[in-house]
Amino acid sequence: MFYLTEEFFSIQGEGKYAGVPSYFLRTGECNLSCPGFGAKYIVDGIEKDGCDTYFAVDKGFKRAWKKIDDAESFTKHLKEKFDEIGYLPHIVITGGEPLLYHRDDTLYAIVDNLVNFGLDITFETNGTIEIDFEDYPAYRETIFALSIKLTNSGEEGSKRIKPKAIANIVNHSKDSFFKFTIDSKLVNSTAIDEISDITSPHKGSTIYCMPVGESRDTIWRNDKSVFEFCMKYGFFYSDRLHIRVFDTTQGV
Ligand code: SF4
């Protein structure tokens, strides 16, 4: 059984597959909370700080999450959605932290089914969880967007950086790439050292940097400095198309 917070058809807005029509499955719960990303929200009358997907992270929202415990009926449901779409979209499994459920029978059976249908699947992960590729081989056929958190997330280094988990994904998956979320303050301080420390063992990997921002306003405050940072160090710039187009609207 895993928790699904939302599912929707949209265009991938970030990273290597930006612009690709994609069907999103967003799982509930995360092993980090990233209070440094500056999204303010209120749950159960308490004001908190979190990331742009706080509604899939904070268990205060759990009553709105859906339990998925039947892989076959959920796969059938997805096939119906694809029939409505008219073609097989890219699948994005995001969160929260979706790999919290990587050993879950239901999630694994769904991923296995989708791999067998020939779909491209990207997991958007914070890269802190070591996947068992031996016992769960379908994950070898999936793609991983490694969104490793930096100091601007407000999380402790030992919690957000797990070199063994990162290496395991880079070495065993069909494809992976790094995606860092940075702001102008980090650009002008430790961003390059932090990114180099994380990525130096993985020389061939592609590195994307994108501006912090849960809204158009915050993206506009950070995009130029991230753009110039990418030019300076040879990283790929990633925008956040869905926020540019839809601002803070969820489910797009
Ligand atoms: S790891 Fe990602 S989903 Fe989890 S709290 Fe941090 S930014 Fe949000």
Image: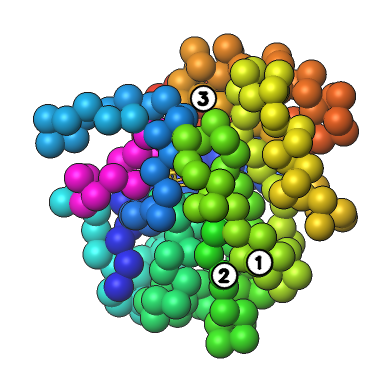
Residue 122 is at least partly visible in this image: no
Residue at image mark 1: 164
Looking at the rendering, the stretch of residues picked out in magenta corresponds to 50-62
Image quadrant where one finds the C terminus: top left
Residue depicted at 55% across the width and 59% down the height = 128
Closer to us: 73 or 224: 224
Secondary structure beneath label 2: loop
Q: Relative to 24, is 238 above or below? A: above
Q: Is residue 71 left or right of residue 97?
A: left
Residue at image mark 3: 213
Q: Quadrant of ligand 1?
A: top left
Mark 3 is surrounded, within 10 Å at the Cα level, by few (under 14), some (14 to 19) or many (20 or more) other residues, namely many
C-beta proximity under 8 Å, tags 2 and 1? yes
Q: What residue type is labelled 2?
A: Glu
Q: Does the magenta stretch include residue 162?
A: no
Foreground mark, 2 or 1, reads 1
Calculate the distance from the C-alpha at mark 1 to the C-alpha at mark 3: 29 Å
Residue 117: x %, y % from top left: 58, 74
Foreground mark, 3 or 2, reads 2
- Mark sitting on residue 249: none
Secondary structure beneath label 1: helix
Residue 196: x %, y % from top left: 78, 42
Mark 2 is surrounded, within 10 Å at the Cα level, by few (under 14), some (14 to 19) or many (20 or more) other residues, namely some
Foreground mark, 1 or 3, reads 1
Q: Does the residue labelled 1 lie within 8 Å of ligand 1?
A: no
Q: Relative to 68, is 189 above or below? A: above
Residue at image mark 2: 130
Calculate the distance from the C-alpha at mark 3 to the C-alpha at mark 2: 28 Å
Residue depicted at 70% across the width and 31% down the height = 191
